[in-house]
Image: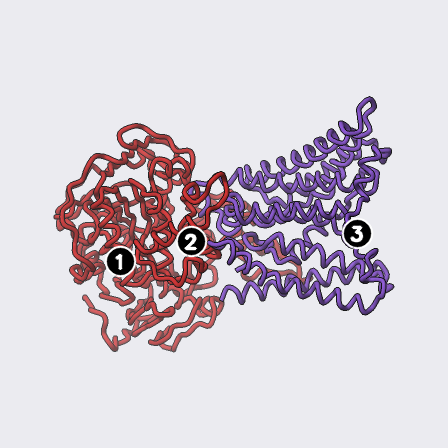
Amino acid sequence: MASPTTATPKLAALRSLINNAGIGLALLFLIVIFSFSSEYFLTANNITNILTQITINLILAVGMTFVILIGGIDLSVGSVMAFAAVVAGKAITLPGFGDTELILLACVAGLGVGMICGLLNGVISAYWGLPSFIITLGMLNIARGAGLQVSNAETIYAFPLAFEEFGSMLIGGVPVVFIVALVMTLIAWFVLNRTVFGRLLYGIGNNEEAVRLAGHPVFWYKVIAFSISGLAAGFAAIIYMARLNIASPIAGIGFELNAIAAVIIGGTSLAGGRGSVIGTLLGAFIIGVLANGLILMGLSDFLRQMITGVVIIVAVILDHYRAKYSAS
Amino acid sequence: MCSAVPDPNPVAAPDDILTVTGLKKHFGGVRALDGASFSLRRGEIHALVGENGAGKSTLIKILSGVFPHDAGQITLNGAPYRPASPHDAKASGLQVVHQEFNLLQHLSVAENISIEAMPRNRFGLLNRPEMNRRARVALDAIGLSDVDVRAPVSSLGIAHRQLVEIARALQSDSAILILDEPTATLTERETTRLFDIVTGIRDRGVTVVFVTHYLDEVFAICDRVTVFRSGETIITENIPDTTPQNIVRNMVGRELEAQMGAATAARIPGDVALSLKGLRVASDPNPAGVSLDLHYGEILGIAGLVGAGRTELLRGIVAADPVLSGTLECNGSAVHFKDPRDAIAASIAFVTEDRKDEGLILDMPIAANIALASMKDISRGGLLRFAREQQIAEEGGARLRLKCGSVRDPASSLSGGNQQKVVLAKWLARNPRILILDEPTRGIDVGAKAEIYAILRDLAAQGVALLIVSSELPELTNLSDRIMVMANHRIMGTVHRPDFTEEGILNLAYGQSDTSPIADLQIEGAR
């Protein structure tokens, strides 16, 4: 069973470790292959590179895990990220404030925009019982349009220096933004495994009616799950701005698909109720390592994209058999 | 003539079109059919009756080629008959009109009638005029000339949809037409019209098999009736030679005393725990709704046929489904539940009929399932306390003698009986004052049943009010202090423990309350 909702946390951790071992082995396998095929792959510089590259996807994927665990999907995260970035960009370039105030304001604006978009996704799909695929597809367009409207389709830049430095800061070769994403992942793990809220998200994904009849406000739990995904998109927007020092209304196109891919490769079931954020972390690593390694091997970006697609399909097929065996 | 079956070798009368001998079918360990024998004559209306699970549906599925039989023989027109598929059965001239509609809502009547063989023109395209013409002929043949064949099926009423299905079934020159509970959703006037048409079909030489829960219908239009009980055919009788009471007696059988566990000694019920006054749920055609009083320390059973509105009533009480009108009183004061959460807060627990779809989270550990309704007890500040959860689960499991390796195993690893105990444990962990159960022992073995009965009796002795819906009459007569019988979303009567007879209860369930000379019943005003 991949649902780490076992009665004792020690056993839960052990089980989730075993379940994630397969994905971990696949990741290890990739790393070994690439370290043989390219001398540059295992250098400190390249590792820093990979960690920087997967940060945004990891943040979006961790938020996405909450939604997919309840059997939903959030297609809007890429657009919401761009919209949040544009609003935060407007805030951070306001004249007449100190740097600290501006950065704080931008964070509040970016996270707020992301969370409100997620909240709307959740309220609309949960209240009318509509498929989140459609609702978030609508939000994908709304947020993209809103971002372009707010920014007049122009890229916003010239942020406070401290903010730009934060984006490229390293601690012992590890990007600070990656550490932030990792901390988020651990918080998500704690919420999903140690809180009533997390337990009931797994429950809703498995059997929504049983959870409702047990007297739990399923509607609100769903709304919160979608809000978390939106909040993660807002968070990704801030990190994105700090790293690239711009806020572009056309950022994040297709990011939702990479995030979904990371969640699925990480072994979370699209049907809901089964999976973990540790898997998502490994899934994000697999996508990042694959992209980096294939480029180092000299493959064209087109081939890289094809191979990533194959990996997604193989991961789902493997997961199908894993689910079957663990059920019997 | 009253030919008593089972007869090992019924002599095939010359006008018999279909003969079934010693038919058997089992699913796993369950014997759905255990020696069914009867015959159909050309041009008769033959009723099949029996309690839920007596084997009627299985028989129809075998005849219509849904699945094969295990043993026994079927002959059709003198030749062995063993359809490999529904298509095969249709080709042999046997058509079934199912209880659930098989019509495509958004297509026209004509398209639905021709769906199996669309007429084509010489370019291989759909020949619409020919299709409409065929549909017209098919509808006229059953006297349905007032229906436009081009109208979409969704624009028709339920009765007309049923008739369109019959027209579709008949257009391919069927020799045998099986109607599976055709009147379940019809009004009286629509039923009359259906009967006229069915009689007309019979007079044209078609054999009609009529599966129904309503005995008055059997007596209104059928020529013969075969009674099923526990997978066997008990008797085939000519309608003029029998009575409704006779049929009910044959459906129930004689094994009334074969019951498990010590029968309940008379309990003295306490105060009224729950009082319904005209409660009406969404799917309820009866505008008056249902009224009842449930007392602390009593077990009130609700009997009735599938579709009588029992589950809907329970779901309405706990606000799992919306309530249209009526009031609910808890401990004498009016309450209004918006969702199951409110009902739970009022100390009501509801064990649903379907443990897999509504009761359990199969992939989750047993402990998580038992604690599902007691999250406050196993958490502090929103954080789970795993030790406390395990303790509650183990205590609950021990109380119900749950057999499991570890409460950390997934609920899916348990047998049906133990799964049901997990559902019970989930609700008992809340110490409810009112316990509502829908089919509490469905699909579980005899040993587990007896254990669950003991638990339920024990709860009643502790003063809990229990409301139990069950389709197994022995279960209700065994457990209950009173049994209310529902039919068509109405309470047909209430029987008290000293007056329990399965015949009396079944007569009420089959809507025979007025004409029943054998039931010594206290009718509490069938509203």
Query: Between tags 3 and 2, which lies in front?
Result: 3
Observer-side mark, 1 or 2, equals 2
Residue at 60% x, 55% y is A268
Say which residue label 2 marks.
B367
Residue A26 makes an appearance in the image: yes
The residue that mark 1 highlights is B451
Q: Position of residue A227 (x, y in %)?
A: 62, 38
| Residue name at image x 57 percent, y 47 percent | A190
Find residue A173 and name its label.
3
Q: Residue at x 84, y 66 (%)?
A: A38
In this picture, residue B502 sits left or right of residue A9: left
> Which secondary structure lies at badge 3?
loop
Q: Residues within 10 Å of mark 1 (few under 14, many from 20)?
A: some
Q: Which residue extends farthest top?
A: A96
Chain ID, mark 1: B
Mark 3 and mark 2: Cα distance apart in space: 44 Å
Q: Nearer the viewer, residue B272 or B192?
A: B272
Which chain, by letter, is purple?
A
First in sequence: mark 1 vs mark 2: 2
